[in-house]
Amino acid sequence: MGRPATPMYPASEVSDGALSLDDAAAFLGVSKRTVEELIHRGELLAVFEGRKPRVLKRHLEDRLAMQLAQARAKQGC
């Protein structure tokens, strides 16, 4: 199936705010495999530095904020 389409970002944003899949997994508190699945499903964006996938930290922060908002909405906060 191939890797997902790679969006274009300024090089400074990628080098300054990009995490390896292992680091992204630690940031989210999930396994590396879960991060790979999120990328494959298009729920998390990956950029590539050469052949190495990276996840932009701001995308991880956005995902956590969305999950927190959904959890609060479920609880009626």
Image (cartoon, rainbow, N blue to C red):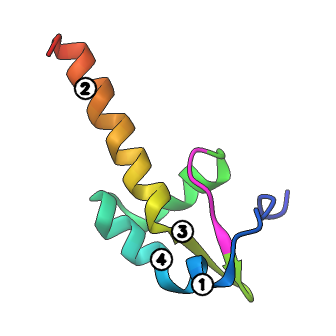
Q: Cα distance, mark 4 to mark 1?
A: 8 Å
Residue of label 1 = 12
Residue of label 4 = 17
Q: Cα distance, mark 2 to mark 4?
A: 26 Å
Name the image quarter holding the N terminus: bottom right
State if disc 4 and disc 2 touch (CB < 8 Å): no
| Magenta-tinted stretch | 43-47
- Please tell me whether mark 4 or mark 1 is closer to you in this view: 1
Residue 28 found in image quarter: bottom left
Secondary structure beneath dot 3 equals strand
Residue of label 3 = 55
Q: Is residue 51 magenta?
A: no
User: How many C-alpha atoms fall within 10 Å of the one at disc 2: few (<14), some, or many (≥20)?
Assistant: few
Which comes sooner in the sequence, label 4 or label 1? 1
- Please tell me whether mark 1 or mark 3 is closer to you in this view: 1
The residue sitting at the right extreme is 1
Residue of label 2 = 71
Give residue 11's position: percent from left, percent from top.
Answer: 67, 83
Q: Cα distance, mark 1 to mark 3?
A: 14 Å
Q: Residue at x 49, y 84 (%)?
A: 16
- Tell me the amino acid under the disc marked 3: Val
Q: Residue at x 63, y 65 (%)?
A: 46
Q: Residue at x 33, y 42 (%)?
A: 65
- Tell me the amino acid under the disc marked 4: Gly
Q: Which mark is residue 75?
A: none
- Tell me the amino acid under the disc marked 1: Ser
Which comes sooner in the sequence, label 2 or label 3? 3
Give residue 20's position: percent from left, percent from top.
Answer: 48, 79
